[in-house]
Amino acid sequence: MKHGKEISQEISQDIGQESIDTSPLHLMAAKVPGQVALHHWHDGGYHAIDYAHLAQRVRQCARQLHDLGVTSGDKLACVDQNSLALVILYWACIDLGAIFCPLNPRFPKAQIAAIAERYGFNHFWAGQAYQALLPEPGLTLSLNAETRDNKLKATKAEATKVEAIRIDTARPCNIILTSGSSGMPKAAVHCLNNHIASALGSTQKIPLVRGDNWLLSLPLFHIGGLAIVNRCALAGAALTLPAPDLSLAKQLKAMPLTHLSLVATQLVRLLNDAPETLKGLKALLLGGGAIDEQLIERLTPLGIPAFTSYGMTEMSSQITTARANAQGSCGFALPGRELKIVDEVIFVRGETLFLGYLRDKPPHEISRPLDNDGWFCTQDRGRFTPGGELLILGRTDNMFICGGENVQPEEIEAVLRSYPGIEEALVFGVADEEFGLLPAAIIKGKVASPAKLEEFLCQHIARFKRPRRYFPWPEVEQTGLKLPRKLVIQAVAERHGLVTKKPA
């Protein structure tokens, strides 16, 4: 079996000098034209597209975009669920030098219009179900995978011919909106070099090779989803698009996978309902916080390598990665990344560090908030274990003061998640005249009684940190590996009339 370092070296050799001016997708189309690049759901079943024909579709899309006036540096806003069209549009933007701007299709039309105006988006495209969300008519493109266009029936020799499309891998290639529920989210800008460095570093810990198959379970409007697309193309692996209307268990039965990204609650449900669907996985990447020891123990008999990581949009996804462990450590910094901790605050830099945030006023320049030595402050709190691995303590902006004492919600959440029956927990402060803010908890799962839970908590944390109130988990979609903290708290606060800021 090859190790991560050997695989990373092979990928580097595949890319070689061509990485300077050639799209990874077209490079793979030339090297392994018949290798499956993508599985997509159509007419009740999965269909495979090899690298040669996916590259051909991308070139055709790029020509269509060019004919419609999309040029280098233009920002193309795309609204859709994960789809073949969205993947094609990403690689077509790479070819053209345009900036791919995927947006959450759950955004209301007014928010999409405000984002478009704020950041100066030039062009729009939406899947058929989402065209009404666009602030202006979208581009009309022929991206249907089952089209009868004769141009798509080219011979294998024609399909494998790679056009000499020279690209600048250091130019902006995409915008990912950082998660934010209050006000406008920031627009983080990446270049292809960021994604290449991220993918190469990832393979050091999670090997990915030709013939492997990774489910695109994370949306492309999150950095985690875009990272999967780039990793697969660089490795010559296959990407599987989720089948609409199929549960995750049925999805895994319909298309055997080697790599899968999940949050802990999804894994718990699979282990409860259909553990056999996980057999055969080479890697399971878990997100959403520390992984409960009992969950790790349930994975062990299945022989599935499970990993946790610490990452962020600004660092092009993963920063550190480790085998899932009871200590909750996230491992060491991957190649292409540097990490340091100052007063329990994490700073990062390296090849994966984004180009910066897009300014919200013309001429929409890119700015990168770094210190004099090029370090980016993550606003995450952490420390190193005795062995030098990273341990996440929480967010600096999540901490609040209760009666003069600092309360870090993530500490309480970790204890809550270890209680039988609790799938997920989120702690926040509720305004109180005497104490300023009192801890409250939002719980997903079943609890015997608040009294027993409080007794359990006081055995593991200081008494003043125990939540004074408990609320059921609201109906809020989790699209990425990280919990949408602000959205969950906002939903509960609005429903129960809570004030989450200290009284003046």
Image: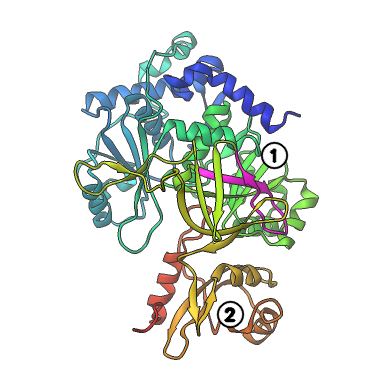
Circle 1: element type = loop
Distance from disc 1 to disc 2, alpha carbons, whole Å, reads: 40 Å
264, above or below 371, in the image: below
Q: Which residue is mark 2?
A: 465
Amino acid of disc 2:
Lys
Quadrant in the rendering for residue 193: top left
Asked if residue 399 lies left or right of residue 172, the reply is right
Q: Residue furthest bottom?
A: 434
Q: Residue furthest top?
A: 157
Amino acid of disc 1:
Lys
Measured as percent of width and height from the top left, residue 246 is found at 54, 49
Residue found at x 48% / y 58%: 478
Measured as percent of width and height from the top left, residue 145 is found at 42, 29
Can you tell which of label 1 and label 2 is closer to the viewer?
Answer: 2
108, above or below 365, in the image: below
User: Depth check: 330 or 34 in front?
Assistant: 330
Q: Which residue is mark 1?
A: 282
Is residue 46 visible in the rendered image? The answer is no
Circle 2: element type = helix
